[in-house]
Amino acid sequence: MSVTTDVLVIGGGGSGLTAAISAATSGAKSIVLEKCARPGGSTGMSVGSFTAANTAYQYRAGVNDSIDLFIEDMKVANGKDEARENVALRRVLAENAGATLEWLSSIGVQFLGPTPEPPYEKPRMHNVLPNAGAYVTALLREARKRGVQVVTNVRVDRLLRNADGEVIGASANGVEYFGRRAVVLATGDYSAATDLKAAYVGEDAARVPAVNKSNTGDGFRLGSDVGGVMLQMDRLYEGLRFPPGRFPDPIKLLPSHPSVSRLVRLVAERLPKRLLAVLLRGALTSWVGPNNTMYAAGAILVNEQGQRVANEDSDKLLARGVAADSNRGFMVFDEALAKRFSAWPNPVSTFPGVAYAYVGDYARYRPDMFHKADTIEELASKAGINPARLRTTIQKVREYGAAGEDPEFGRTSFGAGISEGPYYALGPMQSYITLADGGLAVDTTLKVTTPEGAPIPGLYAAGSTGQGGLQLLNHGLHIGWAMVSGRIAGRHAAQASPRTDLTSVGAKGSVLETPVSELSVIQ
């Protein structure tokens, strides 16, 4: 059986849906193959920030920005990783992010902003309203409008090539799907691919679970099988997060219909910033873990046995240590540190430029994660930690701090340590990989390239799959790249010359054309 279209997109997240829409508006028919029951990918699970320069939101706010300033700020954010940057793709992102955000606005996505995002000089972060589901809702609605067909529950097992070596389609669930003009890989990253994480980062990283369990590196494998090359596969974002709260997050419960988004934007823009920040704190405490500045100030991280599991100087090491143990970690600190992190400029967790959560907010919004007691033993009992071992651990860390040396894990920043009660614990927290920054090598038109830099005929990649060496080390850049790269890949794929030979190498006899209407299609 076979299905034929002009542009075949593999992956139904933000970049894949955008690529399919871009191809359709460029005059090509397109089909999206999504392995999950619902489209959306990591885009729908994200916070949803979109960082861009030269937007109407900036103009209205009186922000005078430029592409070159944007690039210079990305250089600063990169720090030591600037030497690894793909400067050509960075300029593609910077030059197209503003127009892409305006395009999203034109199809019904609403933003709040721009808001500051250090170390950027200019406010560029645009926060989607009411939540990241608005991207998926708007893109699916636009896809239907443009005649894009989204087929779900279809996992691609291999790419198809003809006798000339051109990529002409993909095989999935016993069906051969052909793209006359091109195939676009948009399957997300490899944060849930245990084998890839172990091979390129290490066994400790492989134990850390992913936020998006569907990101199993499918596009990386497919692209590599036909000659593509994976770049910078050592780049994982590992950290600790709180599990979801007992009560649903009201921000995420809001429907992502355009009318709701417009209403939320009108309300958000007119509310005093202090009141808006208060309203968002409940959502903030359900999304992220504490800032590492609390460890630098003296907090420690322990497991349920009351023992430290890693060096608190490193988010990555903490995540790996917790994952290798019971995947339950508790931040422990004293009254002095609690007071310090109860007011600006010392938030426990942040949504930069929008909302800040302090110790009191966790007591108010996350009582299931907040524990306080007058003694160490009482605190341990409330949190479910071994009391005797917790006391021993705290005494050891006090001694390490006094000596300025940690013989167990090599910690160097002890801060004020843990002194007088009352004592506090936040947790349990769990380890997660939020995303991975490796990607297939691509050129500036998003064609997948070989190790020698030659384009692979008929194959494009977008989003995390086609990140190609971009660093994306600040908030809002991953969503920006997903949408920018999707639009570019879809447009160029649609403009490619149609292949005359759609016979896959190794195919036996004739094939039976299957109507797409008989497949699991999102209407």
Image (cartoon, grey):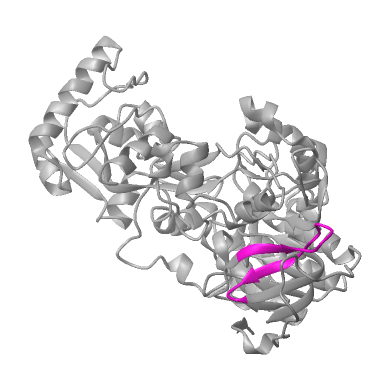
* Residue 126 visible in the displayed image: no
Q: Quadrant of residue 512?
A: bottom right
As displayed, is residue 100 above or below residue 119? below
Viewport quadrant of the N terminus: bottom right
Q: How many marks?
A: 0
Q: Residue at x 39, y 27 (%)?
A: 313
- In the figure, is residue 503 to the left or right of 110? right
In terms of depth relative to the viewer, which is nearer, 90 or 233? Answer: 233
**Residue 36 image offset from top left, x and y in percent:** 53, 70
Q: What predominant SS class does the magenta segment belong to?
A: strand
Viewport quadrant of the C terminus: bottom right
* Residue 232 visible in the displayed image: yes
Which portion, as a residue range, is magenta? 157-174
295 within the magenta span: no
Q: Residue at x 81, y 71 (%)?
A: 502
In terms of depth relative to the viewer, which is nearer, 285 or 310? Answer: 310
- In the figure, is residue 332 to the left or right of 72? left
**Residue 13 image offset from top left, x and y in percent:** 61, 64
- In the figure, is residue 393 to the left or right of 98? left
Q: Quadrant of residue 365?
A: bottom left
**Residue 148 image offset from top left, x and y in percent:** 73, 77
As displayed, is residue 338 above or below residue 172? above
170 within the magenta span: yes
As displayed, is residue 521 above or below residue 44? below
Residue that extends furthest to the top in the rendered view of this protein: 403
In terms of depth relative to the viewer, which is nearer, 436 or 244? Answer: 436
**Residue 139 image offset from top left, x and y in percent:** 68, 71
